[in-house]
Amino acid sequence: MKQSLAIPALLLLSICLSVSCTKSTATTSSSTDTLPAVFKKFDSTLVTISVQGDYVVLQSTGIPDHKSPYFASTDSRYEADTDAGFVKNPNSISAQNYTFKIPLHPALNTAHAATPLGPMGIAINGVPLFNQYAGPSTPLTTEIVSFDQYGGHPQQTGQYHYHVEPTYITANHGDSALIGFLLDGFPVYGPVENGVTLSSSDLDTYHGHFGPTPDYPNGIYHYHITADAPYINGSGFYGTAGIVTN
Ligand SMILES: [Zn+2]
Ligand SMILES: [Zn+2]
C-alpha cells in the first residue's frame, strides 16, 4: 500500500519538475531569442537591429539610400524632381538618431490606439513611415505635391519620411515586397499580393488583413500600402505599439 502510493507521488513530482523546467526555459529564452529571419530583409548597412527582451530594436539615421531634391544641390545625392506637379518644401534632409522598439511577439490590442504624428513605423532602408495626416486631423492634401520622386519629403527638423509608397523600395524589391514594420510589430507589404493590386477597400479599417505572406507562411496580420488614402495605416494600430525615440 505504501509503495503503490509512493510511485504515483514520484511520478507526479517528476511531471511537476519537467513542467517547471520547460516553463523556466521558455522564460529565459525571451531574453536570448534570436532575431526572426524576416528582419534580414532590412538593409544592415542602414539599420542596426538587435533583440532586447521582448522587443526588436532598430536604429537608423533615417537618411534615405536614394537620391532626393531635398539634399543640398552640391551633394552627390541630390537629384532634381522633374515631375511637373512637384513643389519643393523649404526643408532639407538631416541625420537623425532613431531607436524603434517594436514587439518581438506582436499581438492584437482591441483599443487600436491612434498612430502618432511623426514616425509610426520604419522601412527596410531605415526611413520612418508617417501616417496619413500632415498635422492633427489635417489631411495630406496640400503636402502631396512636395513628395519627391521616391515618395518622401523632410519635415521642419530634417526627418525624411514616407506617407505613401516608397517607390525606390518597390522598384528594387518588387510591388509585393516587405516594406517595413509599424511600431506594433506587424509587417507592412507593398500594394500587390498574389498578382492582385490591392486598394483600401480590400483591407480592414486599420489598413491590413490576416493571411500568409512569404515571411510568415502560417499567416500573420499585416498592413499593405495602397495608392489610395489612407495609404499605409487606417484608423490606428492593429496591435500594441512599441516606442520610438529620436
Ligand atoms: Zn510629411
Ligand atoms: Zn496581404
Image (tube, grey):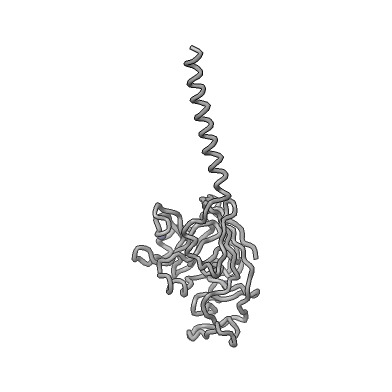
**x, y percent for residue 211:** 40, 55
Query: In the image shown, does 35 or 81 lie closer to the viewer?
Result: 35
Residue at 56 percent across and 40 percent down: it is 24
Query: Up-down: is 174 above or below 87?
Result: above
Q: Work out whether residue 51 or residue 3 is closer to the camera in this orientation and state it.
A: 3
Q: Position of residue 96 (x, y in %)?
A: 63, 71
Is 164 left or right of 196, judged from the image as shown? right
Where in the figure is residue 180, as x and y percent of width and height?
50, 64
Residue lying furthest left? 195
Farthest residue in the top direction?
1
In this figure, what is the number of numbered marks?
Answer: 0
In the rendered image of this protein, does residue 37 appear above or below residue 82? above
Q: Looking at the image, which residue sits at the far bottom?
A: 74
Please tell me which residue is depicted at 51% across the width and 55% down the height of the picture. Answer: 238
Q: Residue at left 62%, top 79%? A: 91
In the image, taking residue 49 as reference, residue 219 lies left or right, namely left
Residue 197 at what x, y percent from top left? 37, 67
Farthest front residue? Answer: 3
Q: Which quadrant of the render holds ligand 2?
A: bottom left
